[in-house]
């Protein structure tokens, strides 16, 4: 069909337009700074592979279970990102004027996803083959090919799961009405800050109410199970570490899922008589409360079972506040792309944690400098565009 390559053309034009819109200083930061970081990371990975080569070559679990499972998970998460990218373009508001049916839109999206998945699969096979060569694994090309089917299966599973949930379809009349259903949670009682409309606007909620859905139920079940296990473990075995870790990781996860900063790009908010600091803190307020509530659930049980562990729990709370503040800066910088913000934040944390063993606390200063720089750039964009 004549519209089949439209999504691919749109994505190509967006990439080219983004590159043309960058200033020379931004390009220098990306090419020189990013190239230096990637070169250092590649050299570090090569050294680590050479050091662990004998163990990696002889590990049956790694090649027969770890490699397929890792490739499947990588393909699944890559598929989620690709299908979201393609469907968001296929059902964009400006596409509504085209005489294209929903079936044709889905076909355009599937074609774009297939091209993206093919390119990613080639990269996965190439990097796997390179890793096999570096550790002198026999039949390197064969093991690289083994990683392709699990990656394709995970990619296809993510695409099929997302296509069954028509979240990008235009809303019908009454889709957003609460009707006779009882809301799961009313946030107006928790969110008392001013301006009062900010949280509902950021979350796209109607009257500040959260309705029950399968995603909320699944996420709540997993987090509730983690809290229950850590609380029971603390009460039964009098150990504070599992509860503190659960509170820290769960509180950060709730904060990341609840944080939304895309209204910072609205011309209405930017021209309103409100400063950047107040707006930034306003959108931070409600997710911080939800994160704190989740943190207090397991740590409260730990403190009741082991009162002497208050210092460990207090340290976990301080770390949670610092990580929440750092992610709030990432989310504000990538205001319209929460997935990219989460990926960038987790990648920076993982890289800083890895380098901590070699350079010690100096790495924390580098991460802090990155957060300050992102905050400065976000503030300038808010005031000057």
Image: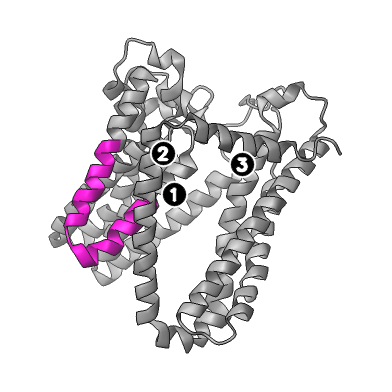
Q: Tell me if I can see residue 335 in this picture.
A: yes
Task: Report the residue marked by disc 1.
Answer: 343
Is the residue marked by circle 1 packed among few (<14), some (14-19), or many (20+) residues within 10 Å? few
Q: Secondary structure at mark 1?
A: helix
For the point 27% across and 37% down, which residue is it? Answer: 373
Residue closest to the eye, 231 or 146: 146
Callouts 1 and 2 close, C-beta under 8 Å:
no
Q: Eyeballing the image, is 20 above or below 131?
A: above
Disc 3 versus disc 2: nearer the observer:
2
C-alpha distance separating marks 1 and 2: 21 Å
Task: Report the residue marked by disc 3.
Answer: 85
Q: Quadrant of the N terminus?
A: top right
C-alpha distance separating marks 3 and 2: 24 Å
Q: Quadrant of the C terminus?
A: top left
| Residue 41 lies in quadrant | bottom left
In the image, taking residue 283 as reference, residue 322 lies left or right, namely: left
For the point 57% across and 38% down, which residue is it? Answer: 15
Counting residues from the start of the chain, the first of labels 3 and 2 encountered is 2
Counting residues from the start of the chain, the first of labels 1 and 2 encountered is 2
Q: Tell me if I can see residue 240 in this picture.
A: no
Magenta stretch: give its range: 345-373
Task: Report the residue marked by disc 2.
Answer: 27
Residue closest to the eye, 19 or 325: 19
């Amino acid at each position: 069909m004549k519209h089949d390559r439209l999504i691919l053309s749109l994505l190509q034009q967006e990439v080219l337009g983004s590159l043309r819109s960058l200033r020379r200083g931004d390009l220098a930061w990306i090419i020189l700074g990013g190239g230096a970081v990637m070169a250092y990371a590649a050299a570090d990975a090569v050294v680590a592979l050479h050091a662990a080569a004998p163990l990696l070559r002889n590990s049956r679990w790694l090649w027969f279970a770890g490699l397929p499972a890792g490739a499947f998970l990588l393909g699944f998460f890559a598929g989620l990102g690709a299908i979201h990218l393609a469907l968001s373009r296929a059902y964009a508001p400006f596409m509504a004027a085209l005489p294209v049916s929903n079936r044709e839109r889905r076909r355009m999206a599937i074609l774009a996803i297939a091209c993206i998945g093919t390119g990613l699969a080639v990269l996965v096979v190439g990097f796997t083959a390179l890793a096999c060569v570096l550790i002198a694994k026999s039949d390197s090309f064969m093991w690289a090919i083994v990683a392709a089917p699990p990656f394709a299966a995970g990619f296809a599973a993510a695409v099929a799961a997302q296509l069954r949930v028509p979240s990008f379809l235009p809303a019908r009349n009454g889709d957003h009405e609460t009707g006779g259903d009882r809301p799961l949670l009313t946030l107006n009682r928790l969110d008392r800050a001013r301006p009062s409309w900010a949280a509902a606007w950021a979350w796209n909620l109607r009257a500040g109410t959260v309705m029950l859905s399968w995603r909320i139920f699944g996420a709540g079940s997993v987090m509730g199970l983690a809290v229950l296990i850590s609380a029971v473990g603390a009460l039964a075995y009098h150990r504070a570490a599992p509860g503190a870790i659960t509170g820290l990781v769960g509180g950060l996860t709730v904060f990341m899922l609840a944080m939304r900063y895309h209204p910072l790009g609205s011309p209405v908010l930017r021209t309103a008589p409100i400063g950047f600091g107040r707006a930034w803190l306003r959108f931070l307020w409600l997710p911080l409360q939800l994160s704190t509530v989740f943190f207090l659930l397991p740590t409260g049980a730990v403190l009741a079972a082991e009162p002497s562990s208050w210092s460990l729990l207090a340290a976990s709370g301080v770390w949670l506040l610092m990580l929440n503040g750092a992610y709030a800066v990432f989310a504000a910088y990538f205001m319209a792309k929460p997935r990219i913000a989460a990926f960038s934040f987790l990648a920076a944390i993982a890289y800083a944690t890895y380098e901590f063993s070699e350079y010690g606390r100096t790495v924390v200063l580098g991460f802090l400098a990155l957060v300050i720089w992102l905050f400065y750039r976000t503030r300038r964009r808010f005031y000057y565009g």
